[in-house]
Amino acid sequence: MNRDKLKALYLKYELTAEDIFTKDIGNSSFTIITRQGIDKIQGIEKIDIQYEAIKCEPNFATIKAKATKDNARIETFGSALKGDNYKDGNCNSWYVVEMAEKRAMSRAVLKLTGFYELGIFGEDESDNFKKTITIKKQ
């Protein structure tokens, strides 16, 4: 059962409530791991990641991540396209290379550790996955 596998992964990687959250987008609900959680997983597994810029332009970047853990190896990509208020783009930052790198890293770590096959995503993979922060007025 996926729930049992997911619980085992959370325990293995010492994830806490601060490392995961659920995000509702439209009619779908996603389980998301924060940047902090991804870093914990990468550190525990000693995952080595090498990056290669595939495309690097002022408004668009694609980064290839080659990640290894023990004898397992995976290649995946991250991309970012700057768009005004997300119109015609998938990020709202001018730091498109950095966003593409973070997305590639998240995907590589989650794929190598079995989270991806359970439908778990990294917070950096989409600006839609960012944790909503509520500020209380005093």
Image (cartoon, rainbow, N blue to C red):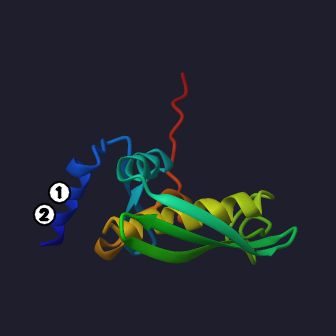
Please provide percent x and percent y for residue 4. 13, 63
**What amino acid is at disc 1?**
Ala
Closest to the camera, between mark 1 and mark 2, is 1
Instruction: Tell me residue 74's x, y (percent).
Output: 46, 75
Kind of residue at disc 2: Asp
Classify residue 9 as left or right of residue 4.
right
In the image, 5 versus 45, the foreground residue is 45
Residue denoted by label 2:
4
Q: Is residue 76 visible?
A: yes
Q: Residue furthest front?
A: 71
Give percent across and percent down for residue 42. 43, 53
x, y percentage for residue 34? Answer: 45, 50
Q: How many marks?
A: 2
- The residue beneath circle 1 is 8
Which residue is pictured at 81% across the width and 58% down the height? 94
The extreme right residue here reads: 58
- In space, the residues marked 1 and 2 are separated at their CA atoms by 6 Å
Q: Work out whether 40 lies above or below 64.
A: above
Do the CB atoms of the residues marked 1 and 2 lie less than 8 Å apart? yes
Q: Please state, as top left, top right, bottom left or bottom right, where the C terminus lies in the image.
A: top right
Q: Please give the name of the residue rendered at 50% of the width and 62% of the height, measured from the top-left corner.
A: 106
